[in-house]
Each structure stands twice: as structure tokens, then as C-alpha cells.
Amino acid sequence: MKTILWATLTANGNYARSSQRHPPRPEATADFAVHARQYGNFIVGRQTFLEFQENASRRPQSASLDGIDITVVSSSLTLPPGAPAQTAADPRAALALVRARGHQAALVVGGERIHRAFLAAGLVDEMIVVVTPSLEDEGRRIVLPSGERREATLIEHAPLDGGLIRLRYALGPSDTW
């Protein structure tokens, strides 16, 4: 199964944080929604899933996630019956659930913890990065396990509205320093 990590980063390489004062860029949200619809699913961590649920009413219709299979990686989240998602304890279990639902590829979104978990397990084949025209303080970054290195090959780049740029990379095998 192909696994694609999707992230929004600032121009200085940090995860683009959001707040009431600085909400997610609508162009990035729309790009995520396009990819989620393309793959029919996404895998997310608990915290990002809860934020998605909390902010659902503020998402534009063009970023609707209706009909998308959502898998939440969490060992502590209990979803009520009829919830719009399923849970998995770890990345491999999440991929097994996505595969069981008939998907050929999985989109992994969220933040540092979920991305690190998939990268550390060697489960990421491609990476889509949407770069926003902003800078942030130290922030958080996409990080591999200590001593690990992976080459990336650019397979697509596209400008998005609002000065954003989408970069898509194929990731090579893990190597050590």
C-alpha cells in the first residue's frame, strides 16, 4: 500500500501552526481536501482529529470531508457508535484498516507525532508539502529518527493560490549516517 504524508510547512520549514488569530490557510485546507477525496481516506492523530471535529463548521464546502474514510491513530480515544472515523493503536494497524476498506493508498495528515510515527516505522513512500508564505519561530519540524537519512526525489510542484506552493516527493529507502 502506498502511504503519502501530507503536511503544511512555513517557508522556514516548520509545521504551519494555526490559532484563532491565524487559522489554517484556506488554500492549504482545499489542497488537503482534494487529496483526501482523491484517495478516499486519511489517517490522522488524535489531537488533529479532535481539532478537525471542533472546526468542521468553519471549513468551506469545497473542503468537505463527507464520505472520506478517517482512521485515527490513538490508544486512548474512544469514539461513540456512528462516529465518522475508526481508531487504530499504531501506524501499521491504521494501514491495515485502510487496506481492509479497499483503498490502495493512504494519506497521512496531522502533525509532528503522527508523521514521526509513520516515518520511524519506515511506512512513508511519498510526501506532499504545501509551503505557506510565512515564517514562524522555532516551531516543530518533520524529523526522522536519530542517525537516519532519506533521499527525496521531486515528482511534482505546483503553485497554489495565495502564494502557496505544493511540492511532492518520492522518498527513497532509509539510510544511516
Image: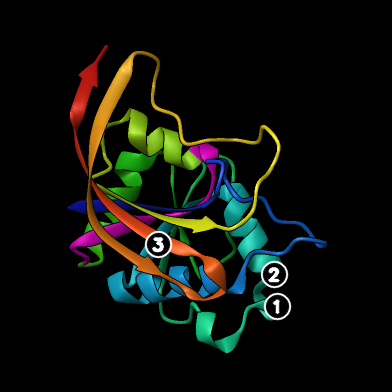
Q: Amino acid at mark 1?
A: Arg
The picture places residue 134, in percent across and down from the top left corner, at 64, 53
Q: Residues within 10 Å of mark 1 (few under 14, many from 20)?
A: few
Mark 1 or mark 3: whose residue is earlier in sequence = 1
Mark 2 or mark 3: whose residue is earlier in sequence = 2
Specify whether residue 83 is in view: no
Q: Residues within 10 Å of mark 2 (few under 14, many from 20)?
A: few
Bounds of the magenta segment: 103-113
Q: Amino acid at mark 2?
A: Asn
Q: Mark 2 sits on what residue?
A: 55
**Residue lying furthest bottom:** 61
User: Is 12 situated above or below 143?
Assistant: below
**Dividing the image into 4 quarters, which one contains the C terminus?**
top left
**Horizontally, is 27 left or right of 95 in the view?**
right
User: Is 11 situated above or below 123?
Assistant: below
Q: Mark 3 sits on what residue?
A: 166
**Marks 2/1: CA–CA distance:** 5 Å
User: Is 129 situated above or below 38?
Assistant: above
Q: Amino acid at mark 3?
A: Arg
**Marks 2/3: CA–CA distance:** 23 Å
User: What colouring style does the render use?
Assistant: rainbow
**Marks 1/3: CA–CA distance:** 23 Å
**Horizontally, is 55 left or right of 148 in the view?**
right
- Magenta stretch holds residue 107: yes
| Viewer-nearest residue: 150 or 87 | 150
The picture places residue 176, in percent across and down from the top left corner, at 24, 14
Q: Which mark is residue 58?
A: 1
